[in-house]
Amino acid sequence: MIRQKNSQGHDFLYQQVIQLIRDMSAQQVLLPGEKLPSLRKMADNLNISIPTVKQAYQVLEDQGLVEAREKSGYFLKVVSMARNLPKRVKLSREPVVVNKQALIEQVYSAIHQANVVPFGIANPIAAAPTDKALARNMRRVMTIAGSKAINYGPTDGFVPLKKQLVHRYLDFGIGIDMDELVITNGAQEAMAIALKCVTKPGDVVAIETPCYHGIIELIESLGLKALEIPLCPDNGIWLSDLERALNEHDIKACLFSTAISNPVGSFMPDTNRQQLVELLESHDVVLIEDDVYGDLYFTAKRGTPALAYSKKGLVISCSSFSKTAAPSYRVGWLVAGKFATQARRYKRALSCSASLINQWTLSEFIASGEYDRNLKVLRQRLRDNKERMRWCLQQAMPKNTRISNPKGGCVMWLDLGGEYDSQTLFLLALEVGISITPGLVFSASNKYKSCVRLSYGVQWSAQIEQAIVTLGKLTLLAKK
């Protein structure tokens, strides 16, 4: 309880507010990532002035204990540890033929089991579900459209949805023609079409490492070779390594997460993204950008799509609504540019069209403003979850564990250390109802045997925190 003002006056009171927040943190009444009481609520509860509370919070911010978020308030921060960030890996000497489908199939089969704690599935929308809002919009579509809603849609997509996407790209100063934009069944199909437009079996494709396992499986299924370019935990791929690879190998295309990477969660600054495009176009190499996590940023602003920096038209941008609205709707897209004619042909050959009713519903969802409102809530929930998970992991995991600090998205990358086997941990965790993703599936070769990916795209609860504690105990059993 705050004592009343005495001879020390205002200074005495705000120092006590500081101490109160410190005590709440130490006693775990207030956890990292959680919001501090509002200025007004704290002032009312303690019978002191709002300026006094504000000064205390600002001092805590200066001390690095809390952070102010615009229009959201003050939040308790995770205390960073020097051991946190994963190490840099070496550039691969040669491209490799990928052979990971059997392992990925095993992981998929396990992580989609019912009634498990879903750390193994990157499903950010679970943190702020859209089911009720989408149901309202779908009912409206069914009323308006009638029997049209169950018809096939145009091969390249529902025109109103395409128009909305064109307008959203205009926010970045990117002008695209609707004919260049093809709606797909998720971003996976978009990337498959992009790769088919610019490569043939046996060609070398540069990918980041660690890399989303869906891309690795896609490269294998298309008969391509993968050349792994190391990923910086903070700023995306190392451009110096990429430049060396371009000089040493006949690379036909690069497929990179140009905004928020999966599984590390790094964020490529706009300046780096511009340099990336300039470097690739100087070698006449196509960039296929995976921008599915672009809107789930924790930084001050969203990263500009790499498409904005292209001068030769050698960037194909792929994204989807799977991470921001509804994974089950399977609505993605690619901006194919000069490859649009080929892209439409491949789309028609692969799946004819995407679901019309799902496209129509998403179009209404965006037009109503609900999509952007929910997106704002989703980013905040994911950021809070990230802070909570990092704090819990720092308490639960072996002391030498390296933990990424994602700049967006919904997944976190852990390097447990060379003495631990993530495959063993994967099986042990599954036995007690916890799904995780072992590191081996994030490499085209055999890297990351001691690494795991965890998703914080969940509804946070005591069960989630207990699962992290359990995971920490199981890790000790996963020593080689």
Image: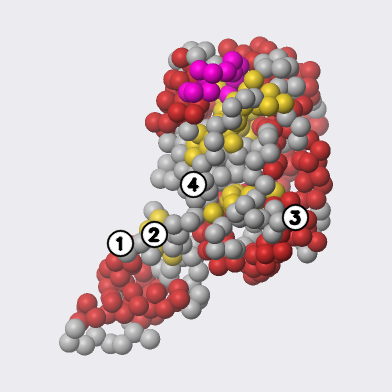
Mark toward the start of the polypeptide (4 vs 3): 4
Q: Residues in magenta?
A: 243-254
Q: CA distance from mark 1 to mark 4?
A: 21 Å
- The kind of secondary structure element at disc 3 is helix
Mark toward the start of the polypeptide (1 vs 2): 1
Q: Which mark is residue 126?
A: none
Question: In the depicted view, which residue is nearer to us: 371 or 253?
Answer: 253
Q: Which residue is mark 3?
A: 424
Q: Position of residue 361 (x, y in %)?
A: 68, 38
Q: Which residue is mark 4?
A: 407
Q: Which residue is mark 2?
A: 67
Quadrant of the frame with the N terminus = bottom left
Q: CA distance from mark 2 to mark 4?
A: 15 Å
Q: Which mark is residue 62?
A: 1
Closer to viewer: mark 4 or mark 3: 3
Crowding at mark 4 (Cα within 10 Å: few <14, some 14-19, many 20+)? many
- The kind of secondary structure element at disc 4 is loop
Q: Quadrant of residue 271?
A: top left
Q: Is residue 294 above or below residue 193?
A: below
Question: In the depicted view, which residue is nearer to us: 280 or 146?
Answer: 280
Q: CA distance from mark 2 to mark 3?
A: 38 Å
Q: CA distance from mark 4 to mark 3?
A: 29 Å
Examine the rendering and report whether any part of residue 339 can be seen. Answer: yes
Mark toward the start of the polypeptide (1 vs 4): 1
